[in-house]
Amino acid sequence: MSEEPKSDWDPRSADVLADQIAAYDALRARCPVAHSEYLQWSVLRHADVMQVLLDHETFSSAVSSYPSVPNGMDPPEHTSFRRLIEPYFAPQHMQAFEPRCRAIAHELAASLPKAGEVELINGFAQDFALRIQCAFMGWSTDLHEPLRQWTGKNHKATLAGLHAAKAEVALEFDGYIRGILETRRAEGGMPGEDPTDRLLNEQVEGRPLSDEEIVSILRNWTVGELGTISASVGIVTHYLAARPELQRQLREDLSLLPAAIDEILRIDAPLIANRRTTTRAVELGGRRIEAGERLTLLWASANRDEQVFGDPDAFRLDHDPSLNLLYGAGIHVCPGAPLARMELRIVMEELLTQTRHIALLPDQPPVRACYPAGGFSELPLHID
């Protein structure tokens, strides 16, 4: 039996949690494939992350103890479910949802003070993420607050790393979704057009989806949406508040927003990490990793790799977009990227057009979010 590697770092130390981005930058320079008790092997360089993403035979996505469709699947099983899911984010569905997305963003932006202070995360970003997710899925507004509380519990359970706590949180979410499915079936009407109704009538490999598979798909979509959209709104708004000239430029030319948002989120990641497990012994970044080991792909580090992007903090709209791992890469690239990009474009358009200026508050610094979340947990701003 091989000896357990010594720990190279502590992902839950106070210094790391205080500024994850700076901690990953420092670790990437001295130990690009690093071992810890909490995350096992962490992969920090862009090239090493890409090696993992493109070699799904060596690096398996089947890492969860409960079903994860299709995120936690490998080919050929993954292929069938991915083929089923991708049409949900096709251009015609994005176009159909855009007016509803616009209405939600407009209403929330209009509710901000015309001149005064606001805490953007709880007072705007989380509300947008909750409302937009429930609207897209066709869920009742009654779920807004339960899902807000559930997101917080999910983050705490992940940081704690306790299997029982994570299982309990997953079970709570499953209860919400199973209740929705039971209600839809009991109504007995014609199938609707929202994704929840459509999933109830889907088939994979000639058979209907099981409730377990439907719940897993909806869980994956919701976990990804609620955390990352809220974090992204906070990150982009903070970045512009700290850089008045860029804020002015984007206000004058909103067509620059899509590329600017992707670049800002490359610099400051809303989604910190993703997981894989090795199917065989492999060398990665100069470290030998045995079969059955757990890997954590640190997007928040790989997207700031100096070997790919030069100065990681330099905001440049001419970076090759194919190198940006904001939505992953390879066969598991995020299928919901078109929806996320549309939502972020629209919410930032509304925020910029319904305000004149957004500024940081010198005496009220923002509070950084802790792993597994990116961005900020509190973001006080002055808006006029």
Image (cartoon, rainbow, N blue to C red):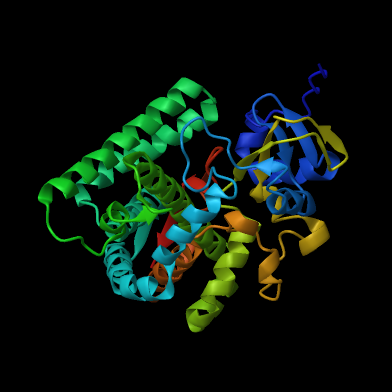
Q: Quadrant of the N terminus?
A: top right
Q: How many marks?
A: 0
Q: Image quarter for residue 32?
A: top right
Q: Residue 363: x and y, percent?
A: 50, 48
Q: Is residue 356 visible?
A: no
Q: Is residue 193 above or below residue 202?
A: below
Q: Residue 208: x and y, percent?
A: 33, 50
Q: Image quarter for residue 267?
A: bottom right
Residue sitting nearer the eye, 343 or 84: 84
For image coordinates 65% across by 58% down, the residue present is 330
130 relative position to 341: left or right: left
Q: Quadrant of the C terminus?
A: bottom left
268 relative position to 34: left or right: left
Residue sitting nearer the eye, 14 or 222: 222
For image coordinates 66% across by 74% down, the residue present is 317
For image coordinates 66% across by 39% down, the residue present is 296
Q: Residue furthest right?
A: 286
Q: Is residue 267 above or below residue 342?
A: above
Residue sitting nearer the eye, 350 or 302: 302
Q: Is residue 179 visible?
A: yes
Q: Residue 28: x and y, percent?
A: 79, 44
Residue sitting nearer the eye, 245 or 10: 10
Q: Residue 351: x and y, percent?
A: 39, 68
318 relative position to 84: left or right: right
